[in-house]
Image (tube, rainbow, N blue to C red):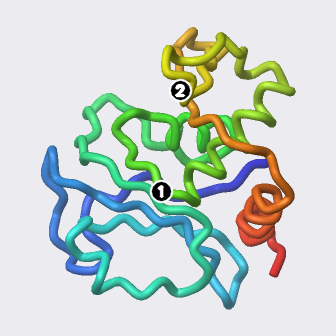
Amino acid sequence: MELSLQPQAAVCFVTQQPFEDGLRVASYLVRMPESGEIARRDLLEREQANYQPEGPVICRWVRAYKKRAPNENPERELKLTAESLFLTLADPATERTEDTTRLLQFLALMLERKRVLRPKGRTADGANQIFEHAKSKELYEVPVGELTPEFFAGVQEQLGVLVGGK
């Protein structure tokens, strides 16, 4: 699964106010109804009530804004793969919702099968599965969930929107 997306914006989509380090920014992946393309919308968390998505929201996450270093290559962020989406959603700075948690669990399962992630057991309380990212050796915690028909129906709906379904 690979998509071409814009890197994180430097200004709020709703107010056009520049982001400052530490401000909480909500990022949305939205399927545009006319073109069917996926667009990223970054906005101040406090402006979410004033944002009307142009199409179906695939997923949303919130994290503290950090300005890109001058030598950082924004082109690196232009390809969003299952792996990079997992890394974004699994980042501890990213707030989890029911939808993003479900997508994170599915991506972990898929990337484990592709040997991009390696299972390393569970946390002491058993609430999270620990995965090691094969390339970076970083450890990520993913909430343990039941792989029920309802789980897969929810994931199927999210992925259908993401890859061009209804």
Quarter-wise, where is residue 42 in the image? bottom left
- As helix, strand or loop, the secondary structure at mark 1 comes to loop
Residue displayed at 23% across by 42% down: 67
Location of residue 118 in the rendering, given as x and y in whole percent from the top left corner: 72, 15
Q: Mark 2 points at which residue?
A: 141
Type of amino acid at the residue the image marks with label 1: Thr
**Is the residue 81 above or below the residue 15 in the image?**
above
Location of residue 131 in the rendering, given as x and y in whole percent from the top left corner: 63, 19
**Is the residue 100 above or below the residue 126 in the image?**
below
Earlier sequence position, callout 2 versus callout 1: 1
**Is the residue 105 above or below the residue 12 in the image?**
above
Question: Relative to residue 101, is residue 36 drawn left or right?
Answer: right
Badge number at residue 97 = 1
Residue displayed at 25% across by 47% down: 65
Between the C-alphas of marks 2 and 1, the distance is 15 Å
Location of residue 15 in the rendering, given as x and y in whole percent from the top left corner: 21, 79
